[in-house]
Structure formats: C-alpha cells, structure tokens
Amino acid sequence: MEIPVPHIAPADIRVLAMMEARSVTGPAKNLLAFAAQARACIDFSVATFERPSASSRPFCEALQEQGVPYAVIAEKRAGDLGVLSQLRRIIAAKRPDIIQTHNTKSHFLLRTMGAPHGARWIAFHHGFTATDWKDRAYTRLARWSLKAAPHIVTVCRAFAQELIASGVAAERISIVHNSVSPVAAPQAEELAALRLSLGIPPDAFVILAVGRLSAEKGHRDLVSAVAMLRSAHPSLELRLVIAGEGPERLALTQTAATLGIAEHFLLPGQQKQVRQFYGIADVFVLPSHSEGSSNVLLEAMAARLPIVATAVGGSVELVSDGDTALLVNPRDPQSLAAAVGRLLNDRALAGRLAANAEAASRQYTPEAYARSIIGLYRQVLNRG
C-alpha cells in the first residue's frame, strides 16, 4: 500500500539518495522499502558507487527490479576524488530538493562539495563500527562529516547520544526506527525441504541467528553458549544455524570445533531469502555487542519467534525483557545459554513472548516509516 500525503502532488519533492552498497544490506533494504511506499508522492532516485572489480550488482539489480531510477558513479579506486565531478553532473540533472546520504563516503563527499542548487542535506546515520583500524578511520571521517549535516536521521536513542557526544546538536537529530513488513509463514513443504538440505533431524531444536559474521555481532558468544547447553543437556538434540557471511567465518568454525559442537553448528552463508530460516527456528538469538535498530530483530518479531537478545543499543527500544523477549548482558555466554535453555524448556513462555513480539512489530511498518520520513522532508523544506 502506497501512502498519499496531503498537499504534496507527485514530483513536488525531488529526493536523491546517495548509498554505497553492493549487496542489499539492512540500510539498503529500508531504502528500497521506503522507495516502494513513497513513489506516489516523491520523485525518488538513487546514486550509488561501483568499482571495476565489482563482480556482481545485487543492490543495483534490486533497484532495477523495483523500478527505482538510479545512477552509477564509477570509482577507479578507494579515495578517488574524480567521483565529485560525476556526482555534480548527477545532481545538476536531477535537481533534487533533498539529498540524503547514507554512508561515510557519501557523507564526506557532500560535506566536501556542499549541497548545490539549493538542495537540503539530510544525513542518515546507521551507526559506527570499530572492529579494525580501517573501521576506526572511517568512523573518524564520518564524525567529521556529520558535524556539518543540517539534519541527521538515526535509528535509535543510543546512536543519537553518540552523535550528541561527538558535537552534533540534539535539535538536528531525528530518531526513526527501521521498518519491517509482515512475515508470511512458509509452507510446511518448504520448511521440510530446508531442514533436509541442511541435514537437520526432524526432532532437533533449531537456534537461529542471522547477520554479518563480524566480531561485534557476538556470534562467538552464541557458539560458546550452545556448547554450554550441550554440556549441561547432552541428550538435547539441537542445531545452531547462523545465516550470514563475513570475516568471522573461520574463527566461528574453529571455535565450534574446539568446543566439540562442530556437528551441531551450521553456517549456510548469506541468504537472499531468510523467511524459511525463521520458519524452522525454535528460538532466535541476537547476541550483538552493539546494535542499532536491528532489521533481523524486527524480522524475528514479525515472524512470531521467541527471542533472546543482548540489552544493547536500539534492541532495548524494540523489545522488553520478559514481555517480548528475554534480554541478557552482552559478552556473557552463560547468560545466553540460560535464556535459550529456558525458552526451549518452557514452550508456554516461548509462545507468549513470540505472540507479544509479533504484535509489537506492527508499529514498525514500512507505511509508518514512510510517513515519518516524508513528514521530515516537509519540515526541512519549510524551514527555508
């Protein structure tokens, strides 16, 4: 369902979104959902980046499938400032009223060149990472760039506080959580086929995590927690499935082998469609050390799954302990094991949490998200 916005005729607001994404990441997924909702009243297009080494273009393919106009900025290498002239040409052709930036590169480029042709700049902040020296350098660059943004949209109060601490005025920040569409239950045949393809016995409990395999996601803590569960309940038939890809794959595999649960641990890789994985899960776990407005947490809520999550960042704004999830401290495998074990043993509690989580997810619809963002566009433009 698209959202009609009173007093705005089609194409009265022209928006150019700058996003560097090869795959359909969480921010890219939200941008695509917004474009689908807003096309009735917003002239929305995207500028993205591509290097010669790119072997695939999933993000561009998704834009094309959805009919979102986009332009590709060709980069020769990292730090190629030749992209500025290309960006200027795109802006001159699109003549946007609003330019929104989504990542460090686009924040930096717009701060460097300014928002030409009278366009207003809105920066979308999805959080900082600091897993290695490169991430820390990008974070410093993003902080510098965001200080110049007239308005910033971020996804949770924790991120807003980080921005304020870095010198951004609170009145320049809006908090808008990510959105989720209702998750349709897969057919029983689909679920049986997935379990068979993964080698999961019909009677085995499935503990599921979804996300990039990187250190800040806390997946090693979850592997340790499952090893503790197996040690305490050796007859318990279970499988830990972590759907995703990233630099932690080898470390996770080695940790599982060291802890003796290699045969109970599955890494099926990044999935284009995770609906079936939610369908085979008995418990969903988000063990992150830091988190914003987690797309996978919202999806698990909408899929009516019992949830264990760490009490970090925006997660505590989406779910509450004992009502819609069980919350535990980060970096605490023992607490994770206890919470997961509790849900596996108490299916009445698991069912109640899952039902409450699904009901809570309905306030984070793509329609509600689009209304918030379109309202913000109007506020920014009315300020002159």
Image (tube, rainbow, N blue to C red):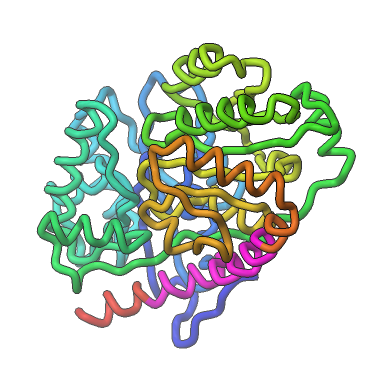
Residue 259, percent across and down?
A: 53, 17
Which residue is depicted at the point 51% across and 41% down? Answer: 336
Residue 64 visible in this rendered orientation of the protein: no
Q: Quadrant of the N terminus?
A: bottom right
In the shown orientation, is residue 58 left or right of residue 251? right
Residue 242: quadrant of the picture: top right
- The front one of 374 and 368 is 368
Point 51% across, 44% down: residue = 286
Q: Which residue is at 44% across, 22% downward? A: 248
Extreme-bottom residue of the structure: 7
Examine the rendered structure and indicate whether residue 124 appears above or below residue 208.
below
If the image is split into quadrants, where does the C terminus sit?
bottom left
Single out the residue that lies furthest toward the right. 189
Q: Position of residue 250 (x, y in %)?
A: 47, 15
As drawn, is 210 to the left or to the right of 81? right
Q: Nearer the viewer, residue 225 or 220?
A: 225
Q: Nearer the viewer, residue 380 or 137?
A: 137
- What is the x, y in percent for residue 351? 72, 58
Q: Is residue 358 magenta?
A: yes
Q: Which residues are magenta?
A: 353-375
x 21%, y 36%: residue:
138
Q: What secondary structure do most residues of the magenta stretch adopt? A: helix
* Place of residue 126 in the rendered image (x, y in percent of width and height, measured from the top left): 34, 51
Would residue 95 be counted in the magenta stretch? Answer: no
Total label count? 0
Is residue 57 among what the camera can see? yes
Name above or below for residue 219 compared with residue 285: above
